[in-house]
Amino acid sequence: MIPLGCSAVQIASPWTPVSPPELPERNFQYCQVQYWDQRYKDAADSGPYEWFGDFASFRALLEPKLCPEDRILVLGCGNSALSYELFLGGFPRVTSVDYSPVVVAAMQARYVHVPSLHWETMDVQALDFPTDSFDVVLEKGTLDALLAGERDPWTVSPEGVHTADQVLSEVSRVLVPGGWFISMTSAAPHFRIRHYAQSRYGWSLKHTTYGSGFHFHFYVMHKGGELSVTQLALGAQILSPPSPPASPCFLQDSDNEDFLSAIHL
Ligand SMILES: C[S@@+](CC[C@H](N)C(=O)[O-])C[C@H]1O[C@@H](n2cnc3c(N)ncnc32)[C@H](O)[C@@H]1O
């Protein structure tokens, strides 16, 4: 299973101290809105909780992509302060969605004094926004949550491929030509590029990392750009992953066993 719960970073806040979140008994619970509703039940009275770093940790990478008048969409906002930090940083037109009505109500209450921030309960697999309605779409940890039920991170299930495709198709649809999709995650390129590198989304793809000590991944998709041949080849693997070895080979079978060539990653 893909570890999701071990990489969050809490930030200091003027609210009551953040108590350690309740971790799910099983990783697939990260895919269930009931888990998130339960986890967020005290969010209105507690401070922000940041998955995969706070705004300060990736600000230098994000800000060059933003203009003050940009319409920004934050997917799966959770209890993060990102949307508010964007407002404070001079990017006020932020719409944030999450499928947990509990956390959306908490965020509406917390930031009621900031009318330019909009909060909506919405499934990121079916965005209720018109085509070409945002200049920038951001996600931090939301695709990780949606894919947390995958049993084998190397071979994504057809359901996992479909789930990611639904989200990414929606992101591509709501982005204006020339818009940016930025994804922050713990998923390294060999796990995530294959999802993003599909020509039907109509974007280019770049990757970098951020954070000190533990590094997170920062993927930048530019709508209207093109994927490289190498990226397209990685994207094609998700539809037809390498087949497993025809028969198992055992290291003790012989001294000249070609076991390395039998590993299909
Ligand atoms: C790992 S948390 C990340 C929260 C926040 N983005 C952050 O950076 O701290 C994943 C968030 O995605 C939300 N989420 C998961 N699946 C979703 C879906 N299908 N539609 C909307 N939100 C979803 C969860 O409710 C949760 O708030």
Image: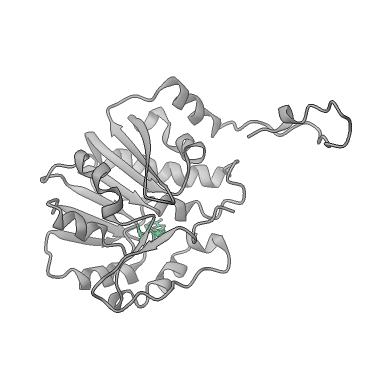
As displayed, is residue 105 above or below residue 71? below
Work out which quarter of the rendered image holds the C terminus and state it: top right
Residue toward you, 110 or 189: 189
Q: Position of residue 165 (x, y in %)?
A: 44, 41
x 36%, y 32%: residue: 205
Work out which quarter of the rendered image holds the N terminus and state it: bottom right
| Residue 128 appears in the picture as rendered | no
As displayed, is residue 101 above or below residue 252? below
Q: In this view, does 1 lie to the left or right of 97?
A: right
- Tell me the quarter of the picture where residue 193 sits: top left
Query: Which residue is the extreme one toward the right?
Result: 253
The mark tally for this picture is 0
Picture colour scheme: one colour
Q: Is residue 187 left or right of residue 98?
A: right
Query: Which residue is the extreme one toward the top?
Result: 229
Q: Where is residue 85 in the image (x, y as percent from the top left)?
A: 20, 58
- Tell me the quarter of the picture where residue 109 sits: bottom left
x 81%, y 36%: residue: 248
Q: Position of residue 148 (x, y in %)?
A: 52, 54
Q: Is residue 175 left or right of residue 53?
A: left
x 47%, y 23%: residue: 230
Q: Is residue 129 left or right of residue 20?
A: left
Residue toward you, 45 or 54: 54
| Picture quarter with ligand 1 | bottom left
As displayed, is residue 236 above or below residue 128? above
Residue toward you, 155 or 20: 20
Q: Where is residue 231 in the image (x, y as percent from the top left)?
A: 45, 27
x 14%, y 58%: residue: 88
- Tell me the quarter of the picture where residue 82 sits: bottom left
| Residue 85 appears in the picture as rendered | yes
